[in-house]
C-alpha cells in the first residue's frame, strides 16, 4: 500500500474556528492589491493547518480571516496537488446534481449528505496573481463549492433541512461542551 505524503511547512498553525462562531456566517471581502504581502504569508499557514487537521480544504474565514481565499488538496494518488484560489467566482454550474457526504473542519466529526451541482466552473487568481479557470466534477467539485460557500458565510449544514441542521448543531455543541 502506498503511503500518503503529507507536506510539511515550518510555519505556525492557525486555530480553526468552530461553528457557531460569528466569523463563519460573515461574507468575506475580496482580496485586494494591498493584501498581497499578507496573503503570501497566510497561504503556507493555511495549507499547514489544513494538512495537520487533517482536511482537504480550508477557507480563510475558518481561520478567522475575512478574505476571499481558500486552499484545497485532495491528494490524488496520495501525492500533494495543492490549489490556492484567491477571489474565486463560480461562472458555471451543471444542472445535474450529485449527492455526497460532507464534513467540515469547523464542524468536527459532523457529516451529512449534501446535494450540489455535479460540476462547477470557477474563475480565480492563483497565488502568483495569475487568472485561472478550472472545471471540476466529483469530489473536487463538491470541495470547491463547499469552500466557496464558506466565503459567503454558508456552512454545509445550511444546505440541509432545518431539522437535520438543528440536530447536527446540537450534537456539535454537546461535543464541544464535553471537550472543555
Image (cartoon, rainbow, N blue to C red):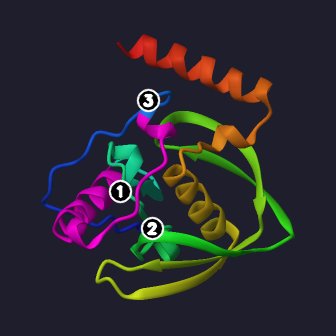
Circle nearer the N terminus (2, 1) = 1
Would you say 128 lies left or right of 145 here? left
Q: Earlier in the sequence, mark 3 or mark 2?
A: 3
Could you tell me how far apart the alpha carbons at marks 2 and 1 are, in whole angstroms? 9 Å
Seen from the viewer's position, the closer of residues 35 and 19 is 35
Of the residues tagged 3 and 2, which is closer to the observer? 3
Residue 98 part of the magenta-drawn span: no
* Dot 2 alpha-carbon crowd within 10 angstroms: few under 14, some 14 to 19, many 20 or more: many
167 lies left or right of 26: right
Q: At numbered mark 3, what does the secondary structure look like: helix, strand or loop?
A: loop
Q: Name the residue beneath numbered marker 3.
A: 21
The C terminus: image quadrant: top left
Q: Main secondary structure of the magenta part?
A: helix
The answer to whether the residues at label 2 and label 1 have Cβ atoms under 8 Å apart is yes
Residue at x 50%, y 70% (from the top left corner): 88
SS of the residue at dot 2?
loop
Magenta residue span:
23-52
**Which residue position is annotated with label 2?**
73
Instruction: Look at mark 1 in the image and give the residue it sits on.
Output: 51
Task: Name the quadrant containing residue 3.
Answer: bottom left
Looking at marks 1 and 3 on the same chain, the residue that comes earlier in the sequence is marked by 3
Residue in view at x 75 percent, y 45 percent: 113
Determine the secondary structure under disc 1: helix
Determine which quarter of the picture holds residue 11: bottom left
Q: CA distance from mark 1 to mark 3?
A: 22 Å
Amino acid at each position: 500500500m502506498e503511503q500518503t505524503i503529507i507536506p510539511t511547512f515550518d510555519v505556525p498553525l492557525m486555530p480553526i474556528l468552530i461553528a457557531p462562531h460569528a466569523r463563519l456566517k460573515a461574507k468575506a471581502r475580496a482580496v485586494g492589491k494591498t493584501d498581497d504581502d499578507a496573503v503570501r504569508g497566510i497561504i503556507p499557514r493555511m495549507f499547514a493547518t489544513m494538512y495537520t487537521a487533517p482536511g482537504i480544504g480550508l477557507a480563510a474565514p475558518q481561520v478567522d480571516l475575512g478574505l476571499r481565499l481558500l486552499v484545497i488538496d485532495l491528494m490524488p494518488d496520495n501525492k500533494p496537488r495543492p490549489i490556492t484560489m484567491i477571489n474565486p467566482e463560480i461562472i458555471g454550474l451543471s444542472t445535474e446534481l450529485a449527492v455526497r457526504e460532507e464534513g467540515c473542519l469547523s464542524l468536527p466529526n459532523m457529516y451529512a449528505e449534501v446535494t450540489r451541482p455535479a460540476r462547477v466552473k470557477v474563475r480565480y487568481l492563483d497565488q502568483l496573481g495569475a487568472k485561472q479557470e478550472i472545471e471540476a466534477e466529483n469530489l473536487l467539485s463538491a470541495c470547491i463549492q463547499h469552500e466557496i460557500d464558506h466565503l459567503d458565510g454558508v456552512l454545509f449544514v445550511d444546505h440541509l433541512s432545518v431539522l437535520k441542521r438543528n440536530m447536527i448543531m446540537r450534537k456539535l455543541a454537546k461535543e464541544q461542551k464535553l471537550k472543555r
